[in-house]
Image (spheres, grey):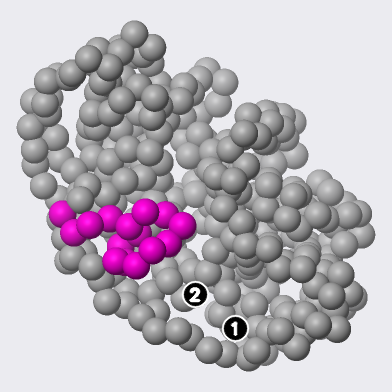
Amino acid sequence: MHETNRRYVLAKRPEGVPDKETFELEETEIPDLETGQVLVQTVYLSVDPYMRDRMRAGESYAEPWDVGDPMQAAVVGRVVDSENGQWNEGDYVTGELDWAEYTVTGGSALHPVDPDLAPLSTYLGVLGMPGRTAYFGLLEEGKPTPGDTVVVSGAAGAVGSTVVQIASIAGCRVVGFAGSDTKIEYLEEIGADAAINYKQTDDYRAALDDAAPEGVDVYFDNVGGPISDAVFTKLNTDARIAVCGQIAHYNEEGVVTGPRKLPQILPTRATISGFIVSDYAPRFEQATQRLGNWVAAGDITYRETITEGLENAPDAFLGLFEGENIGKQLVQVTDE
């Protein structure tokens, strides 16, 4: 048993794009457990774009961190000590825990995972929050029907790549936006009918004319910005827009303006829905089961970008805003 623990705290609130000075790696003692508590050793932790909003002082759908607070993430780990009858040493669990080697937590914050059923890492990716976000965001908010054209921004990420594959399973024409030739190749491998490298495209509207000649029925928006401005001009009547993320704007300090979108909404009678995956919490098991069946059958594949070492977690997080990852970005803190 380690007597000390390394964990990241929020060192300061960033202005614009975060940098290394945003994070502080501190060493603390591991306290003795109280009744009901569990000590979890982190195996993998997730870094996700929404964490940028938690660095702000203002309100968001995710509670902001105070300066000096331990940063938190979805974690898969093993129980190494327990004063809680629900959990035993050696159990593998997932939960919202610290960016740390170890976290002391109450047992109610944890959920079991089965390493014999699927790799541990998938419980933070295709079988975890990103997979469920794709599942409910597309099927419940986007409501695709066979023959629809579905456009996905951020299509090579953990959420977007799963959306691409579910849309393909649903019998749709799928168009994905991504930021490198390698990612474009990946989208073609997983079933996208067309893929647009936004970093090599000057005119997104013209690219969509080629990729989606019959217009857009469903837009799964992970990004916002100029890509969304272009997609909105191509919406068909009764189109559905599921707003999952806006990574293009997360580091902006002011309110960004661009082409006004409402003129496109009026004649198309399009529906825009923002959603938070936690709204579907009562149905998480349904999504995980169905996603697991698709993965087992080979209908959905996944990729992961894994950064080794807790000390490199800030680099993994900052890389999200440069589009460095393909699929789910994880940090491996200790061996499985």
Name the spot of residue 106 as percent of width and height, x first.
Answer: 31, 25
Dividing the picture into quadrants, the one containing residue 55 is: bottom left
Which secondary structure is most common in the magenta stretch? loop
Point out the stretch of residues depicted in magenta.
Answer: 53-68
Q: Say which element carries label 1.
A: helix
Q: Quadrant of the N terminus?
A: top left
- Residue 226: numbered disc: 1
Along the line of sight, the residue nearer the viewer: 156 or 147: 147
Mark 2 and mark 1 in contact? Answer it, CB < 8 Å. yes
Q: Residue furthest front?
A: 59
Q: Quadrant of the C terminus?
A: top left
- Please name the residue that numbered disc 2 is placed on: 248
> Along the horizontal axis of the image, is 155 left or right of 79?
right
Along the line of sight, the residue nearer the viewer: 122 or 97: 97
Name the spot of residue 146 as percent of width and height, x first.
Answer: 91, 54
Specify whether residue 9 is in view: yes
Q: Say which element carries label 2.
A: loop
- Residue at 63 percent across and 29 percent down: it is 285
The amino acid sitting under disc 2 is Ala
Marks 2 and 1 sit apart, C-alpha to C-alpha, by 9 Å
Dividing the picture into quadrants, the one containing residue 216 is: bottom right
Q: Reply above or below: 219 against 166.
A: below
Q: Reply above or below: 141 against 26.
A: below
- Residue 82: numbered disc: none
